[in-house]
Image: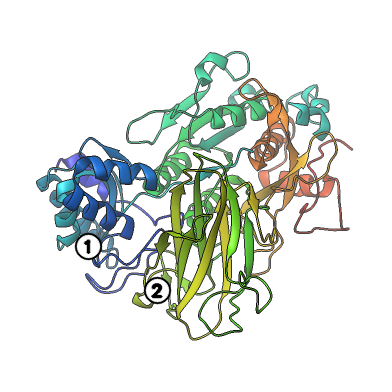
Amino acid sequence: MSGKRLEIIGWGAAIAMGLILSLGGWRDAPVLAGPQRDSGHPFMEARLAQLNDVYLTEGLKAARRFARRRGIQVQGRMVQVVVEAEQSGSDLEVQAAAVLVGRAVEELGGRIEVAHRHMVQNMIPLESLQALAENAAARFVRLPLRPIPLTTSEGVAQTGADRWHAVPAYRNSGEAPVVCVLDLGFQDYKSLLGTELPVDTEAVSFRTDGDIAAGTPHGTACAEIIHDMAPNAKLVLVNYSTDVEHHNAVEWIINRGVDIISYSLGWLSAGAGDGSGPICEDVKKAHQAGIVWVSAAGNSGRQHWQGRFRDRNQDGWQEFDEAGSKDADYFGFWVDKGESFSVWINWDDWGSWNGSRYIGSEGNDYDLYVYDKNRNLVDSSTYRQSNGAAPIEGLVLKARAKGWRYLRIKKRSAVRDCRMEIFVVNASELEHVVPYGSINVPADSSYALAVGATDWAGDFPHPYTSMGPTSDQRIKPDLTAPAGVSTQTYGKFNFHGTSASTAHVAGAIALIKEKTSYSLDQILQLIKIRALDLGTAGKDNLFGDGRLKLAK
């Protein structure tokens, strides 16, 4: 391993979306949370173990087919994975453990892509997957986890930002506010330089392939709105694709020196919902560095349910309808043909966050099952939380035909009836919907300014916008802002979602910073005071303090 790789591996923080580790002694029971089922391999994520089994028994073609259906990235004979090394002990001990992992990867014919503290992201041959998991240096082998873009202008005039544009700048051009758009991709951004985007826009990719476009214009559209709101602000575009890359990107942004991070992404089941967890830890670090983190509340308002586990007939299955109904324990949702969708459940047994991991879980264990329209079992996620894994189960699937699908939740063992939470991504309709509590990570962080979506023309809340409270009963979002606006990237009135709303708020903060002598803390207070109070008087879990309004 080169000296550069050794240096890279030596630094880091935590992990992300639906993947929280609770680490004990060396090579203890696995503690992965996320898409799981019993695999028979204690040190490999279940979907990877299934892929390994398919490859060994049916060959490469069948393994590739399985990977496509399960959202696993396979290139040729190589699969992208993250290896977790031991993270307890001193920084030097963690670094040494990660170096051993890197050596094991290379000895097995793999290629290291990127590393962060105890995590080593790499491409490994399918035939070496099991050997890697069994290597003593590898505490656990998992898939990289990825966030979701919250996409679902006229907002410049509606918020009153246009009336600020003519105000003389308080700061000179060398002190222009710097806004970082931290996103998944910036397709075609170069074609907009000098028109919809500043000519001096900076772009940096933390993806292992260095692809700043990454096949999505989502970040480009967000940057357009920020430029519309604050034409003189300096823009820095940063993208990533996995949890490991995210941590490295945030460290770079902090060292780069920015004023505001515009974050129009969300992670599901990536923490206890109380502002703790690895992604929220990145937000906290940015806040401590004096950066304002503006975070999309999420688009899960119509794709969320929560409630206490209820099993009145004592058959072990969660009941969603009244007792006695033959369908009481089936939760229906509609998907379209060819649509990739995911189902996630989590429950309130995370334990306590100590700054790097969760500790003290009770081990309450629930399983997830998904069925087709005829109630035939499609797949299951049945990892044993009694082994110390985080309280999450999840599946990523693709619909071969449109129609209803169903999920069920089974209690395997529990000392109490936990509060259950369900997210179904890319379903057009859910049989049961509870919008309250649907706030995404890291918008649940007390260090993030969470933004919900209202219609630019009518000031009504969009039904998809995620709502609080957080699991520790704090009000979220903090603010709302326009969505359904026009951009060059998405067209007329076609940029929906809390993504668009977030960009409006990030741009507003940059605009006020340029035009006044106010500190960032003072600007946040000004925005709160001037917000147009909508709905229930005072701050609430739908509008926060109200809709962004810069002019009286």
Q: Identify residue type, mark 2.
A: Gln
Q: Position of residue 58 (x, y in %)?
A: 20, 48
330 above or below 241? below
Q: Nearer the viewer, residue 167 or 431?
A: 431
Q: How is the image coloured?
A: rainbow
Which x, y percent locates residue 53? 22, 55
Q: Say whether residue 306 is visible.
A: yes
Image vertical order of residue 311 relative to residue 250, above or below: below
The residue depicted at 48 percent of the width and 57 percent of the height is: 281
Q: Amino acid at mark 1?
A: Glu
* Residue 445 sits above or below residue 456 on the image: below
Label 1 or label 2, whichever comes before in sequence order:
1
For label 1, the crowd category at 10 Å Cα-Cα, with few meaning under 14, some 14 to 19 and many 20 or more, is some
The residue indicated by pointer 1 is 93
Which residue has dot 2 on it? 385
- Disc 1 to disc 2, C-alpha distance: 28 Å
Instruction: Check the picture and name the quadrant holding the N terminus.
Output: top left
Q: Quadrant of the C terminus?
A: top right
